[in-house]
Amino acid sequence: METRNHTRVPEFIMEGLFEHPHLQGLFFGIILCLFMASIIGNSLIILAIVLHLPLHKPMYFFTANLALIDIVCTSSVLPKMMQNLILGKKTISFNGCMAQLFTFTSSAATELVLLTAMAFDRFVAICHSLHYIIIMTKRVCITLAACIGALGTMNSLVHTLLMLRLDFCGPNLIQHFFCEIPPLLALSCSSTYLNEVMAFIADIFLAMGNFLLIIVSYGFIIRSILKIQGSEGKSRAFSTCSSHLVVVGLYYSTITYTYIRPLSGYSLHKDKMVSVLYTLVTPALNPLIYSLRNKEVKVAFRIILTVCKRDSC
């Protein structure tokens, strides 16, 4: 009986995001700027929350976790992309592709559930403000974060193991700029039915299920805010939720478009463009979204910058 080793290609060739070789330097500069903006911005968010005592609250604890996930997500995709631009090649080893798939899928799933935890935190803060300190204790927050991370890792592990059981006989051209589930399934020469079913089920629970919970949470939040007397109180309550709502809107719109469809419904070129938003743009924008309208975070940034200037003198 023949072994299946011959059905596994040693490496994949990625189509990439850009099609004009003479502009590779410009593209590299753009990606580098986005990568640095994401790493520096999210690192500053984490540093501010860790060092500034007034930010030691559940809301900011989850924000720091979101920043960490964005760093992982960006780091799983952009460094390899920049390396290929510098070297003038578009290849990735099979094992490297599976590692990238696992890391990215894990961070994406974790972020979906974390956004729900952040909505729950806002729900408790606004709808049950008198019991907020009792409900959202440090132990509860840490337990939630640990469970969310474990869920995202287990989900990614299942998809990666299912991908490893597939045959890839060739062609080995990935019509994407990184290793993601849909374009990889399109390359397999064996049945991908189980992979598609498991991916669809997981995305229904992780994406649609969590999105429904967020909608329900904000339904109660809006009802409670409308009962608040005075426009100032309403404005303050809405401001605590606005950043989270913007992030949810950006992230869920792109993830849902990419994943909540059968494989036959994919347009790989369009999906590649949409993927730019949640791998390059959103991680770089999140620090701005969470800091521009947040006075406490701005104060923390000023303190950090003041300390850095003083130490450098």
Image: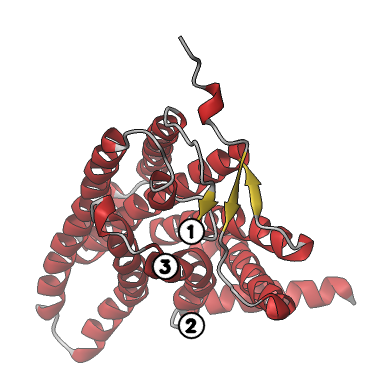
Q: Secondary structure at mark 1?
A: loop
* Residue type (three-letter) at the residue carrying disc 1: Gln
* Distance (Cα) linking label 2 and label 1: 36 Å
Q: Secondary structure at mark 2?
A: helix
Give the residue drawn at x 43%, y 82%.
Answer: 293
- Residue 129, compared with residue 148, is above or below; it is below
* Residue type (three-letter) at the residue carrying disc 2: Leu
Q: Residues within 10 Å of mark 2 (few under 14, many from 20)?
A: few
Screen quadrant of the C terminus: bottom right
Give coordinates of residue 148: x percent, y percent.
37, 42
Disc 1 designates what residue? 175
Comes first in the chain, label 3 or label 2: 3
* Residue type (three-letter) at the residue carrying disc 3: His
The residue lying toward the viewer, choosing from 202 and 247, is 202
Mark 1 vs 3: CB contact within 8 A: yes
Q: Nearer the viewer, mark 2 or mark 1?
A: 1
* Distance (Cα) linking label 1 and label 3: 7 Å
Disc 2 designates what residue? 292
The quadrant in which residue 150 appears is top left
Give the residue drawn at x 87%, y 73%.
Answer: 312
Screen quadrant of the N terminus: top left
Could you tell whether 217 is left or right of 299 in the image? left
* Distance (Cα) linking label 3 and label 2: 34 Å
Give the residue drawn at x 21%, y 48%.
Answer: 204
Could you tell whether 245 is left or right of 47 in the image? left
- Residue 122, compared with residue 106, is above or below; it is below
Disc 3 designates what residue? 269
In the orientation shown, which residue stands out farthest toward the front? Answer: 1
Comes first in the chain, label 1 or label 3: 1
Colouring scheme, one of rainbow, by chain, secondary structure, one colour:
secondary structure
Give the residue drawn at x 69%, y 80%.
Answer: 23
Comes first in the chain, label 2 or label 1: 1
